[in-house]
Image (cartoon, helix red, strand yellow):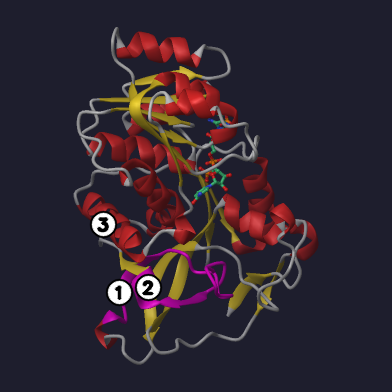
Amino acid sequence: MKAAWYDTKGPAAQVLRVGELPDPEPAAGEVRVRVHVSAVNPSDAKARGGARGNVAMPFPRIVPHQDGAGVIDRVGTGVDPARIGERVWVYEATLGRASGTAAQFSVVPAHKAVRLPDDVSFEVGACLGIPAMTAHRCVFADGPVTGKAVLVQGGAGAVGYYAVQMARLGGASLVLATVSREEQAVRAREAGAHAVINYRTENVVERVADLLGPGRALDRIVDVAAGVNLADNVKMLGARGVIAAYGSDAEPQPPLPFFAMLAKDLTLRTVLVYVMSDEAHAEAVRFIDHALRAGQLVHQIQRVYTLEQIVEVHEACESMKNVGKLLVRID
Ligand SMILES: NC(=O)c1ccc[n+]([C@@H]2O[C@H](COP(=O)([O-])OP(=O)(O)OC[C@H]3O[C@@H](n4cnc5c(N)ncnc54)[C@H](OP(=O)(O)O)[C@@H]3O)[C@@H](O)[C@H]2O)c1
């Protein structure tokens, strides 16, 4: 099969290769997916680059990318052969495994290949995995958001964009989003944000207070930059509010404003999609599947690359300047 891979960790241009590898075979309980579209996420690039000292190779050779979409073409024992031919979206293809979606074939546990509705494209299917599942957990892990006021910090990011949509679908009465430029503001509004705040040019705490009106505070915050935003988040939340934090690249070890948080009985929840319980994964899949079938989700695709452009895709991902998903078409 045609595939991209790396045998050592390091900069994309130094370690990523494209060529021919043996076709993988599905073991018991697994399916093999003929991948049509693969997606890169920041964690794919971080894993390949050896971020945070994680430089050891868990396998001698890794085909990267957790997320993708395609068609099941083989099944292992114990999997219903009727699944052959099923269009699917794939999540966590390289979690504890080496056969990611940046290849013509990826082998995954059967439940990680989820039926894709006929009218949903492979491009859209490849967008879902990490971003939509993380967003689901961030929005719903602490109970329903019905009637609640929710702020999504980074509402045009891959995760944030779905978090805005899911908060709206969950019945939040006010959904606010922070962005840093007009291109992002357009996306956050199209996701359903009632109002958008530019965190670089506006005072977020004051704008949120104005938008909430007197006597009201935020109930929930979903945050991509938890460390830098922590002090402001504590100011904006009301009693028993929750911060669901899934990223903190700029400030990995923020000082904890303990007594300010204690005074409001706040919860700081961290979310790591890979460590979510089986039940949380299943709930996210059910929600996403239902929303897809009901046509309730919109998706943002910035650019579709070829597999030969794998280095360019990873470097673009690492720039963190994208508005929308970076995808790879696998011919
Ligand atoms: N924990 C998990 O399970 C999980 C899952 C998915 C992703 N992540 C991590 O989350 C991060 C984002 O991933 P992604 O795929 O969503 O990336 P993305 O599509 O590049 O989105 C990141 C967004 O964060 C915004 N942002 C950065 N600093 C901000 C700040 N101080 N306040 C508000 N918004 C800010 C960016 O806007 P600007 O242009 O203004 O910077 C951008 O819109 C990465 O570090 C990734 O590894 C974690």
Q: Quadrant of the N terminus?
A: bottom right
Badge 2: how crowded within 10 Å, few (<14), some, or many (20+)?
A: many
Residue located 52% across and 68% down the image: 95
The alpha-carbon separation of the residues under discs 3 and 1 comes to 15 Å
Instruction: Say which label, 2 or 1, has the lower sequence index.
Output: 2
CB atoms of marks 2 and 1 within 8 Å: yes
In magenta stretch: residue 208? no
Q: Which mark is residue 71?
A: 2
Mark 2 lies on a secondary structure that is strand
Instruction: Say which label, 2 or 3, has the lower sequence index.
Output: 2
Q: Which residue is mark 1?
A: 86
Q: Is residue 233 left or right of residue 141?
A: right
The alpha-carbon separation of the residues under discs 2 and 3 comes to 17 Å
On the image, the x and y values in percent for residue 49 come to: 72, 57
Camera sees residue 69: yes
Badge 3: how crowded within 10 Å, few (<14), some, or many (20+)?
A: some
Residue located 52% across and 74% down the image: 104
On the image, the x and y values in percent for residue 267 come to: 41, 36
Camera sees residue 180: no
Which is nearer the eye, 113 or 210? 210
Instruction: Relative to 56, say whether 323 is above or below.
Output: above
Q: Which mark is residue 289?
A: 3
Badge 1: how crowded within 10 Å, few (<14), some, or many (20+)?
A: some
